Amino acid sequence: MSIFKKFMQFSAVSSMLLLAACGGGGDETASGTEGQADGGSGVVSADIGVISYNSGPGAAYGEAITNGLKLAQEEINAKGEVNINLKIEDSAGEQDQALTAAQKLINSENVTAIIGPTLSTEMNVVGPEADLSGVPIMGTSTTAEGIPQLGEYVFRNSIPEALAIPASLKKAIEAYDVKKVAILYGNDDVLTKSGFDTMKATAEEMGLEILTIETFQKGQSDYNAQLTKIKSLNPDLILASALYNEGAVIMDQARKMGIDVPFVGGNGFNSPEVINIAGDAANGLIVATPWFGEKEDPKVQDFVAKYTEKFGKAPDQFAAQSYDGLYIFAEALKNAGDSDRDAFRDALAEISNFEGILGNFSFDEEGDVVMEPTVLTIKDGKFQEFNE
Amino acid sequence: MLAELINPYYLQVGSFMLINIILGISMYITLSTGQLSLANAGFMGIGAYTSALLTIHFSLPIPVGVVIGAIFAGLLGIVVGLPTLRLKGVFLAIVTLGFGEVIRVIFVNWESLTKGSVGLSGIPHMGRELLKTVKELGFEPKMLGLQNNQFIFMAIFLILLVIVIFVIWFFKRQNDSRIGRAFSAIKLDEQAAESMGINITYYKVLAFAQGALLSGFAGALFAHMLGYISPADFAYHKAIDILIFAVLGGSEVIWGPAFGAFFLTLLPEVLRFISEYRYMIYGVIIVVMMVVRPQGLIDLNVVKWIKRKTTRRGLKNGTGN
């Protein structure tokens, strides 16, 4: 009997705490529906939920993403065609946190649609849930295989590796007459591992001879063992699926060792930081990216100027992708004419030939990206468009 | 009325809370023999991967997968426990932390089975499978006036609640039994316990295996709740999270880690309104609490105090039984 009583005490205390904690959430719901109600005045108004990686080791990604979104929101609302209200939630880069954030946005805040989460791993968990609840969700930085295939309500506007790597590899093959390649990748990171899978498949498809496949771990600082082996095999090109911090060190050590063949990198390798870390050794890196800040497009230059003025640093691809992402949402919202989730989903799926700062953008029938990525190379210490 | 009260968000948080309570208790059991093991995250991964792989490849029902996952983790606990439990204190902690990392590296490198660091997706989801089953039996959530997702999370929450109640009940009972007394004798003084005729190795391995079994069980539930797992979920920071449940909540009584898990799962959600700063505040709260109450929030005195308070109130109002 006493056990039962003790349990009752415990559960009474805990449910009281739980109720107290939930009290805060309730108020916000009320304000959320209010925002949607003034859609009658001609301007479509909607709450858009954002799940991003704002605290923890990857907080820089989340910061760039939310900055891009805030800038886009300001501009869109100033135009007055639609009114977007952002509800930003942090996921700390963890699947369970991302899932509770999504549940909060879907059920407590009643958002029309969600942008995010930041990582593909998080999207793997959140996507099916949003799809089940009928909430359109779009990743602006999820590049892994199979993301839009999670459900009818799942979209992305970030160029998947499956689009980026073949593009850069093709140009590199044309320019350097590549026959034999070596592959080097980080096997304990989702992004670099899935990048490697794509690289291997692409290289096989293009009929290249893969001399060796070498792996390394996150945070490794000495790559001489792998590079010595690669050097002895004498490849025409090195495919490196690495994040920029490891990638830059790899290039530095490779150049010192006398390996002067070009490198083709994946999405994680694409950062101006590579030049800062590796200096001259970074010359010869080829990456395909949706985002090129030096492009002579007034829209791009305008965005770079505004972003730099507002946040004190130049935008990276994450900021650019989320900025374009919110514009795509605004366009869909305008076409839907209503903040209803299903109407919005249909309008979103029909987006095609959207002209953003990343270029001409369309969704395919699965909600994946149709877009021509720009291939960049590092030459004379800066990123330039690759045309040889 | 019912339908408005059931918000999947709260139920989701509640479900994570319950899983974390199981993890907290798994830490408590090994701690109750005075051993500091940091292998719980590794065992959690074993349970999660075992159950996920079995349900994906052999289409086993989820409950069977979860039970096999837990048992497998428990057996591994015995195998690992036998040699390592000769070590004590900080050495055991280091060895078990190493074990957890070994498990994670195996998950990363055994790509043909685990898909490496990309992780396993498409794991059958507890709630969705349950919904499918009840629909086949001709039951619709609408009969209760519920949406599909409300029904799903309601069901998950209730199932987990029953499990957690059972787990707490079981280990409360065990604590008051011969085994529990042997555990606390070992915790107080190993040599004295041995001279009293307690088979130390047996009880230490038993506690370690029970902890492993429970972690594996929680891990399997975790896998079927998220539908996706990757090796990074079971890295050392998870082990530390689990340790904090027990340390912050208090490891003297079973309510300690349970409350610790409850509190530390709730805290980040309650702190959502300060967005980027919430983990900073979370850290500050942990530091302050450890300074103020190094023995953990709930210890024997608190339990006695609550008991006294409630019995007295019960007597006054005439509701005590």
Image (tube, coloured by chain):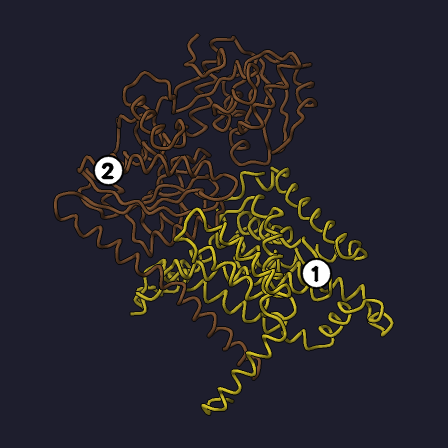
- Observer-side mark, 1 or 2, equals 2
Q: Dot 2: few (<14), some (14–19), or many (≥20) neighbours within 10 Å?
A: many
What residue type is disc 2 on? Ala
- The image position of residue B210, as x and y in percent, is 68, 63
State the residue in front, B73 or A16. Answer: A16
Q: In the image, residue A63 lies at what x, y percent? A: 42, 38
In the rendered image, which quarter is residue B75 located in?
bottom right
Q: Chain of mark 2?
A: A
| Mark 1: secondary structure | helix
Please state which of residues A351 and A92 is positioned toward the viewer in this rendering.
A92
Tell me if mark 1 has few (under 14), some (14-19) or many (20+) residues whose alpha carbon lies within 10 angstroms of its own: many
- Quadrant the N terminus of chain A occupies: bottom right
Q: Residue at x 38, y 21 (%)?
A: A292
Q: Which residue is mark 2?
A: A332
Q: Quadrant of residue A215?
A: top right
Dot 1: chain letter: B
- Please give the residue where the numbered disc 1 appears in the rendered image: B209
Is A224 situated above or below A48? above
State the SS at label 2.
helix
Residues at marks 1 and 2 on the same chain: no
Q: Position of residue A10 (x, y in %)?
A: 51, 74
Task: Answer with left or right where residue A363 lies relative to residue A218.
Answer: left
Asked whether B148 or B54 is in front, the reply is B148
- Name the foreground residue: A128 vs A306: A306
- Residue at x 46% of width, y 74% of height: A12
Chain A tint in image? brown
In screen coordinates, is A119 left or right of B38? left
